[in-house]
Image (tube, rainbow, N blue to C red):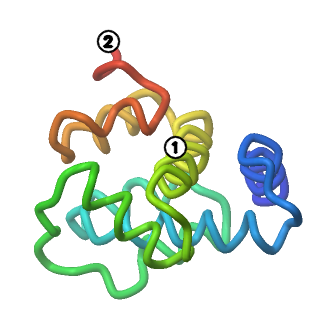
Amino acid sequence: MKYGQFIKTVRENGEYTDRREAEHVAVSVLEVLRSRMTPEGAAHLAAQLPEPLDDVLLADAPDLPGSFGVDEFCRRVAERTHAAGTSAQMDASVVLSTVAATVSGGELNRVLSQLPSGYAPLFGEHELSD
């Protein structure tokens, strides 16, 4: 998926008012995801995302990923987007399900295997794919 289509999908699915808002939400969610992944995992995912979203995952990746669950993930998204808790969960789900539609099944499994249980629904998945 090309960058324009990625942002268009996020904008439509999230019902954002304009492209700028959709871009801000996409970058915010990917920044939080990056903080939860290993540098190697972030690099693998970045390789399958369109520019400039790949740069978000490669910038200042921590050596050790943070250890936090879905609630904290959504709280961090809310902090970046200035959204309420339920809106932040929707923001995360809109962006991460677009990521899931963009990357290969193997890459999606690789990402989900780095995260604790509970993250798969944010990606529009029930569990790891076969």
Determine crowd level at label 2: few under 14, some 14-19, many 20+ residues with C-alpha closer than 10 A: few
Decide if residue 111 is on the left or right side of residue 85: left
Q: Residue at 28% across / 71% down in the picture? A: 35
The residue most toward the right is 18
Decide if residue 20 is on the left or right side of residue 40: right
Determine crowd level at label 1: few under 14, some 14-19, many 20+ residues with C-alpha closer than 10 A: many
97 is higher (above) or lower (below) than 55 = above
Instruction: Report x, y in % for residue 112.
Output: 28, 38
Circles 1 and 2, Cβ within 8 Å, touching? The answer is no
Quadrant occupied by the N terminus: top right
Q: Amino acid at mark 1?
A: Ser
Marks 1 and 2: which is nearer the front?
1
Q: Label 1 to label 2, Cα distance in Å? A: 21 Å
Decide if residue 84 is on the left or right side of residue 20: left
Q: Residue at 62% across / 66% down in the picture? A: 25
Q: Secondary structure at mark 1?
A: helix
**Residue pointed to by mark 2:** 130
Q: Residue at 58% across / 71% down in the picture? A: 27
Q: Secondary structure at mark 2?
A: loop
Give the mark, 1 or 2, whose residue is nearer the N terminus: 1
Q: Which mark is residue 93?
A: 1
